[in-house]
Amino acid sequence: MTQFSFSLLTGDTGPLVKGNTPDRLCIPSDNHVPIMAEGDQVLAGTRIATAKRHGDGDLHSPLAGIIRTVHTTSLTSR
């Protein structure tokens, strides 16, 4: 069996860098039901919407922030 060695710090991929945090983040939620309300504070990884269909994954916040608007098709945080 072939063995593979992979490192994120190799010359092939370069070092990992931290990106800038956006001022506003809009998360599409077409196939999800939002479970957060405007004004709710979320941490990175907090579940913010549940899937409408079995087999689809729930949505989780990629960043910490405050939910500013909730629409049937998206959530916006800042």
Image: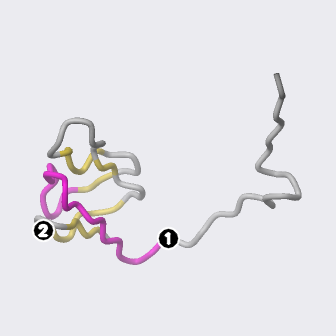
The image quarter in which residue 53 lies:
top left
Residue 27 in percent (x, y) is at 30, 65
The image quarter in which residue 70 lies:
bottom left
The quadrant in which the N terminus is found is top right
Disc 2 secondary structure class: loop
Identified by mark 2, the residue type is: His
Part of the protein shown in magenta:
22-40
The quadrant in which the C terminus is found is bottom left
Is disc 1 in contact with disc 2, using a CB cutoff of under 8 Å? no
**Residue at image location 18% in from the left, 52% down from the top:** 32
Label 1, on which residue?
21
Disc 1 secondary structure class: loop
Instruction: Find residue 71 and name its label.
Output: 2
Instruction: Find residue 47 and name its label.
Output: none
**Residue at image location 21% in from the left, 67% down from the top:** 74
**Residue at image location 20% in from the left, 45% down from the top:** 51
**The one of 67 and 4 positioned closer to us in this rendering:** 4
